[in-house]
Image (cartoon, rainbow, N blue to C red):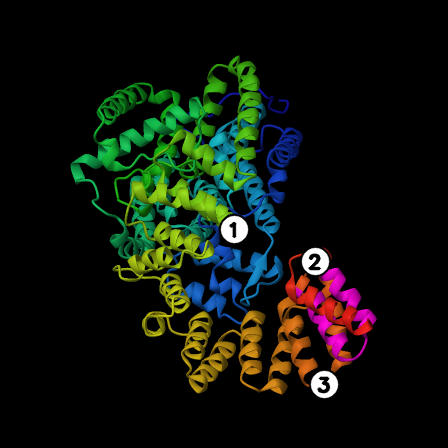
Amino acid sequence: MGAATWTDVILDPENPPKQLGAPASIGGSFVSAIVLTGVVFLLFARTWAFPFVPYDDAINITENPLFAVAGAETFSAIWRAPLHKLYIPLTYSVWAGAARLARQGLSGDGYHVFAANLFHATNVLLHLWNTLWVAALLRRWIRSELAIFLAAAVFAIHPLQSEAVVWVTGMKDLLFTAFALPSIWCLINFARGQWRPYFWLALATLTYALALLAKPAALALPLIVLVVGYYERLPLRRLLTVFVGWVCLALPVIVMTFNIQADTVSNPAALLQRPLIAAHAICFYLIKLLAPINMALDYGAMPSRVLTQSAPLFALLFLLLLAMWLWLRRADGWWFGVALSIAALAPVLGLIPFEFQSHSTVADRYMYLPMLGVSVLLAMLIMRWQRAAVFTLPILLSLAWLSYRQVSVWANPDALFNHTLRINPGSVLAWQSLGAGRMTEERWGDAVPAFTSALSLRPRFGDALYNLGLAYERLGRDEDALTQFAIVAMSGAPTAASLEGGARTAKRLGHWQESLRYLHRCEELFPGRAQTAWLQAETLAASGDVSAAKSRFVTAIARQPNAYEIHTAYADFLSDHGEGGTAVTEYKTALRLDPGAIAARVNLAGVLAQMGSYEEAEAQLRESIRQQPGMVTAHVNLGIMLEQTGAKQAAAEAFKHALTLDPNRRDAASGLARIVGSRS
């Protein structure tokens, strides 16, 4: 008998054999893998050039002190306790490794700066890994390589998959799926009694545990065990033993996740209402599967909003009818793909409240693993109606085009959040993230309307309150900024950033004691922050307590020795208080950390000139001008210093350069006038 062809028959779902045997075609499998690889790279490789997104990428990676602060005890902290309301130490470990390789230098406050391309590349490779595993799983149930390829291609390119792949923070969905799929494969080997079945059970359990450590959504796997075990005709006793064992393994994660997210879930739906929410979510995903348009980061499907509509009741009735029909047609096996998808979705259907429900119960990324069930169902339909393969090809091309467009939306954060707002104008998340993106671009004035729009929808939204205060601060509106910072600082959940923001603006307004009170509270709630000690030093110096200020500068540097801005501020303080020699040391430390720190270089030149080291001072000023030719102050200072040393011709040239850059610069004009007057 020849090798199985692309149109071979499906395994009998009522009595699947213990072993499938060889794949339909080894050559066909290899070709499928190559083509699927090409498809994934063609669609997603360009995301390697995309930036981080100002929604969760900052808190998880770019501004995460465990990654950004040099010398942080990263891995021990990751595994010791939950971070940002989730215990996902495996995901954070991968992020930590990528962050270490993606460093691009230090910011002024001593934090590492990261490139996004390595994170995006990792996401694409994980998606490729998962796509190939989906194809491998399909081969356990399907004997047609064409059906396997088409179904796996849908997993690879459906627009619902874009969010998890393109968003750096979406790696947690990709990573837990990367362990969940091999776990299912090992479970099938156990169910079919293949070589040393308990070895496969142990391996399935190990990969399940790793999936749990990547994201709590892996809690769906015990339910997937029931579905796969029933389909594979695993004896009920063995099936329930595996199910109960896996649930027990997940109990610590369940309890931990519930405890850390309990306070963030406001007004959860009543128990009897939750099936309606779940039914609405399932039907929402069904619609998006069939018509993947108007995709958004936030759909606004909060339980309180969903329950005011009649749609959830009709959705529940539809699903009950669908379940009855699938039961009557159970011999066709179509129920298997549907059950796989629903089991994979179960943790995020709203049956158990979770944090993101404050924005929406549904999200594209939640369909990432459930797309396995969609692929299984599609492969079975192609096997039943082989002509369907003809229609699948144009559908795949349409999905690829829609995915290409959806991926393009993520290339620019401003475009991403404006796109979300066109679909859901009431998205607090999108308004807040839009403003945050404009802040990173230093568009302070444009950020204010975005934050005020977010606060008009949710007046006590802490992130928007703080960021609005920060925008006001950048615009010089210190009174307005202090008001916003104070609201967050006096709330039940103050942040270090809000307390420090209040301290900064109070200091600029001359309210020294108020500033110090903010910082004292910050030190109590968030001990060990270099930024807090630095602000304390500057506030104490401004209030005249020089000795205490010097002590806090030393503390700030000890906490963050790589922050060139703190070294520069300390050097300025020392210079102002007659400690020029020590100031020179601190300026040089700042320049060692960042040779491009122009302010430190110019101020160092000033101190050197005061100490009589004119030659070194001139070298520092000329280096400043070389690095930043348009810096007027460097030209003026060079002119003043050259004038003092008697090099009047060179001094005149420096003053002329300064006036060319800024005709209204009075110190340059007066310096040039002095030289011209002395010649006459």
Q: How many marks?
A: 3
Q: Secondary structure at mark 2?
A: loop
Residue 176 shows in this picture: no
Name the disc covering residue 16, or none.
none
Dot 2 alpha-carbon crowd within 10 angstroms: few under 14, some 14 to 19, many 20 or more: some
Q: Position of residue 81 (x, y in %)?
A: 37, 64
Residue type for callout 3: Gly
Q: Position of residue 499 (x, y in %)?
A: 35, 65
Q: CA distance from mark 2 to mark 1?
A: 23 Å
Name the disc covering residue 630, or none.
2
Name the disc covering residue 612, or none.
3
Residue 481 shows in this picture: yes
Q: In front: mark 1 or mark 3?
A: 3
User: Chief secondary structure of the magenta span?
Assistant: helix
Where does the N terminus fall, quadrant-wise? Answer: top right
Q: Bounds of the magenta span?
A: 633-659
Dot 1 alpha-carbon crowd within 10 angstroms: few under 14, some 14 to 19, many 20 or more: few
| Residue drawn where x is 69% and y is 71% of the image | 637
